Image: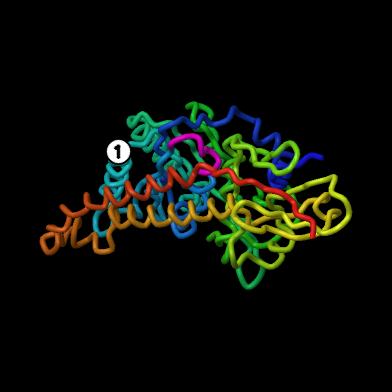
């Protein structure tokens, strides 16, 4: 009798994107790395979901990684979205200062999506701005991952057909790739479809063609790992029961609540396949309670599990990451920042001295994240009904 708890999603990724995963060496993730997310709405909007950071944290649970999300909706290589009531040049200076203050060892740079609206005529200016930005980021000593824009999703009428704009974004993605290749930056290509090679998507990933839903971010985070060269590994347990899962594992966050019904029905998730049981019904139990009851034949074929203790732990990890990011966001981008840091700071500028008081709060959440990222082993067995 043997047991294998495996991520069938991992097998699917490995088949669909083996070439993509091995087109360049894996991105070198190191113990103690501080990741900074820099770019536009793609990163900023994930603050409400936390999937990108959660997948990275859980995948590298044996490493002490920390993250700072410095994204700003509408961001460009020129920092214009950060200008507020000031000039674009001052917005750019704020962007570079924020990066330096975060002390990154890795920068995930997501640019080009907003600049692409300028089309071919804007490529030269974009290249110049990108070169300047990368030079300033290089000065931090951080390793840089350049991430291409994601293509707009065609959801049909009454929304417009995004084909023309997607062609523009491919032009800007080509510039990003060329610059990455010439300067030895890591390049993560997200311009290909994010549906793991399927001819038709399981379900829409965006709500309007541009902004990812919670389900979309769940899928996008997996794709980003693949783009970095990391196929989601198998989750194995070998031997007679009772059994424990190998401690070198990767547990995915469960599919988000509210995901489209087609995704809930067809999406592939971590699956337990257990052969050799005599005919009958069996309940999989863990040291924390019953998990699932079904027939020996169905256990042999494989049953999707989304409520095992390890997955619940990852969900708690994600919630903790979201709260940590909320605190950091309120520290560096307070809602009334114009009155604290901007041209009206003569009114409430005294509150600027209180921003360091967020540091110990953030540190407490990062301590909790460090505890939650390491999978706790649980003992499993099958009980015949």
Where is residue 202 shown, x and y percent of the image?
Answer: 71, 59
Task: Choose top left, top right, bottom left or bottom right for residue 190.
Answer: top right
Considering every residue shown, the one lying at the far right of the view is: 279
Could you tell me which secondary element the residue under label 1 belongs to? helix
Part of the protein shown in magenta? 56-64
Quarter holding the N terminus is top right
255 to the left or right of 344: right
Q: Is residue 206 above or below residue 233?
A: below
Residue 172 visible in image: no
Q: Nearer the viewer, residue 91 or 47?
A: 47
Q: Residue drawn 38% across and 46% down? A: 366
Where is residue 251 shown, x and y percent of the image?
Answer: 60, 46
> Label 1 neighbourhood size at 10 Å, few (<14), some (14-19), many (20+)?
some
Residue 141 on the magenta segment: no
Q: Nearer the viewer, residue 298 or 9?
A: 298
Q: Residue drawn 60% across and 46% down? A: 378
Q: Residue drawn 28% across and 54% down? A: 331
User: In the rendered picture of this protein, how many numbered marks are placed on residues?
Assistant: 1
Q: Nearer the viewer, residue 79 or 202?
A: 202
Quarter holding the C terminus is bottom right
Residue picked out by circle 1: 100
Considering every residue shown, the one lying at the far bottom of the view is: 158
Where is residue 290 shown, x and y percent of the image?
Answer: 66, 59
Residue 274 visible in image: yes
Q: How is the image coloured?
A: rainbow
144 to the left or right of 136: right
Q: Residue drawn 49% across and 58% down? A: 49
Q: Is residue 335 above or below residue 169?
A: below
Q: Nearer the viewer, residue 209 or 294?
A: 294
Where is residue 115 shown, x and y percent of the image?
Answer: 46, 50
313 to the left or right of 73: right
């Amino acid at each position: 009798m043997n047991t294998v708890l495996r991520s069938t999603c991992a097998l699917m990724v490995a088949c669909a994107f083996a070439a993509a995963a091995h087109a360049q060496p894996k991105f070198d993730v190191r113990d103690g790395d501080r990741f900074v997310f820099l770019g536009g709405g793609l990163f900023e909007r994930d603050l409400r979901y936390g999937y990108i950071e959660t997948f990275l944290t859980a995948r590298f649970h044996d490493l002490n990684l920390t993250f700072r999300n410095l994204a700003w909706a509408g961001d460009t290589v020129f920092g214009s979205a950060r200008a507020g009531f000031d000039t674009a040049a001052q917005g750019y200076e704020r962007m570079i200062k924020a990066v330096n203050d975060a002390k990154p060892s890795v920068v995930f740079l997501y640019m080009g999506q907003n600049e692409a609206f300028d089309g071919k005529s804007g490529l030269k200016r974009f290249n110049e701005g990108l070169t300047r930005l990368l030079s300033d980021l290089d000065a931090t000593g951080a390793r840089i991952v350049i991430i291409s824009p994601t293509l707009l999703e065609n959801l049909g009428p009454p929304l417009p057909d995004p084909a023309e704009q997607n062609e523009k974004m491919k032009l800007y993605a080509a510039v990003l790739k060329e610059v990455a290749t010439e300067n030895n930056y890591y390049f993560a290509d997200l311009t290909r479809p994010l549906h793991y090679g399927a001819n038709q998507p399981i379900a829409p990933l965006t709500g309007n063609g541009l902004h990812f839903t919670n389900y979309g971010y769940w899928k996008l985070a997996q794709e980003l790992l693949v783009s970095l060269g990391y196929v989601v590994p198998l989750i194995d347990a070998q031997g007679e029961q009772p059994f424990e899962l190998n401690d070198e594992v990767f547990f995915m966050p469960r599919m988000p609540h509210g995901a489209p019904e087609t995704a809930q029905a067809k999406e592939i998730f971590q699956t337990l396949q257990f052969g050799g049981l005599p005919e009958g019904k069996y309940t999989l139990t863990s040291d924390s309670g019953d998990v699932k009851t079904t027939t020996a034949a169905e256990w042999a074929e494989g049953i999707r599990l989304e409520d095992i203790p390890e997955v619940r732990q990852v969900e708690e990890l994600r919630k903790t990451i979201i709260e940590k990011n909320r605190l950091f966001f309120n520290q560096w981008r307070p809602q009334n920042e114009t009155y604290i840091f901007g041209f009206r700071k003569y009114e409430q500028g005294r509150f600027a001295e209180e921003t360091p008081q967020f540091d110990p709060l953030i540190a407490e959440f990062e301590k909790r994240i460090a505890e939650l990222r390491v999978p706790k082993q649980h003992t499993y067995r099958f009980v015949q009904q």
